Image: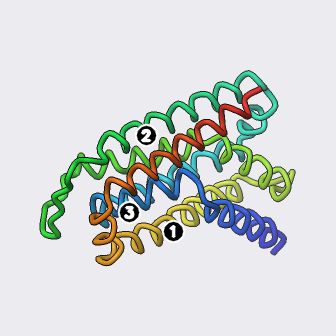
């Protein structure tokens, strides 16, 4: 049972990290509001896959390498910031477009794939995520951790990240939040774009 404490530490740390406000929350919430519950859940699965990617990198020691090589970490920060600027531009540009949302509209597989990809890229382009994973795994991962323990951590991280953002998607795809969003779409989209842009600027300001 020596593995229970490290597993609980990893799961708890990642859950609290996921619940802190950031671009991932904005992306999943807006996807669920603007498109559909299925799209929001697809974005949530993308967040889970991104979390699993970082967990695998942490288990393999790649995150430690990244955070200890300033040039690589700086490149990640710059790319992440510009991806947030790109998302902010897209959201702002679409703020005046009217959405036609029908509950019985068929959802195309390609569209769900795009929502999944948006969630995944948002997660892996966030340098804060790399720092959180590196810190938690450095503290919690046993030095003599076996392969099955690492696999368990990766699987658990997917469940934690995807589970939390699925809750966000389900909440924001409900009828009342969606109706309020549609009534104030232009304002709310511009606010979301501003948050994205501000987060991008914050990341760039930390580049050194």
Q: Nearer the viewer, mark 1 or mark 2?
A: 2
Q: Residue at x 20, y 53 (%)?
A: 98
- The CA span between labels 1 and 3 is 9 Å
Please tell me which residue lies in front, 156 or 143: 156
**Residue wearing tag 1:** 163
Secondary structure under tag 1 reads helix
The image quarter in which residue 18 lies = bottom right
Q: Quadrant of the C terminus?
A: top right
Rendering coords of residue 93 (x, y %): 32, 39
**Residue wearing tag 3:** 41
Q: Crowding near pointer 3: few (<14 within 10 Å), some, many (20+)?
A: many
Q: Are marks 2 and 3 in contact (CB under 8 Å)?
A: no
In the displayed structure image, the side of residue 206 where residue 186 appears, left or right: left
Q: Which residue is drawn at 27% across and 58% down?
A: 35
Image vertical order of residue 73 relative to residue 112, above or below: above
- The CA span between labels 2 and 3 is 19 Å
Q: Crowding near pointer 2: few (<14 within 10 Å), some, many (20+)?
A: many
Q: Quadrant of the N terminus?
A: bottom right
Q: Residue furthest top?
A: 71
Q: Residue at x 14, y 66 (%)?
A: 102
Secondary structure under tag 2 reads helix
- Residue 87: image tag: 2
Secondary structure under tag 3 reads helix
């Amino acid at each position: 049972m020596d593995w229970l404490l490290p597993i609980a530490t990893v799961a708890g740390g990642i859950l609290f990290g996921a619940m802190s406000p950031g671009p991932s929350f904005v992306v999943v919430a807006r996807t669920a509001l603007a498109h559909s519950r299925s799209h929001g859940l697809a974005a949530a699965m993308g967040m889970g896959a991104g979390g699993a990617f970082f967990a695998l990198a942490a288990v393999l020691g790649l995150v430690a390498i990244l955070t200890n090589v300033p040039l690589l970490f700086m490149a990640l920060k710059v790319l992440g910031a510009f991806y947030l600027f790109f998302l902010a531009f897209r959201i702002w540009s679409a703020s005046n477009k009217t959405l036609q949302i029908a509950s019985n509209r068929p959802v195309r597989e390609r569209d769900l794939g795009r929502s999944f990809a948006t969630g995944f890229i948002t997660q892996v382009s966030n340098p804060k995520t790399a720092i959180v994973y590196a810190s938690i795994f450095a503290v919690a991962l046993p030095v003599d951790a076996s392969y099955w323990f690492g696999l368990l951590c990766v699987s658990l991280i997917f469940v934690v990240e995807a589970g939390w953002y699925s809750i966000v998607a389900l909440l924001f795809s409900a009828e009342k939040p969606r109706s309020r969003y549609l009534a104030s779409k232009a304002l709310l989209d511009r606010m979301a774009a501003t948050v994205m842009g501000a987060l991008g600027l914050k990341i760039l300001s930390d580049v050194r």
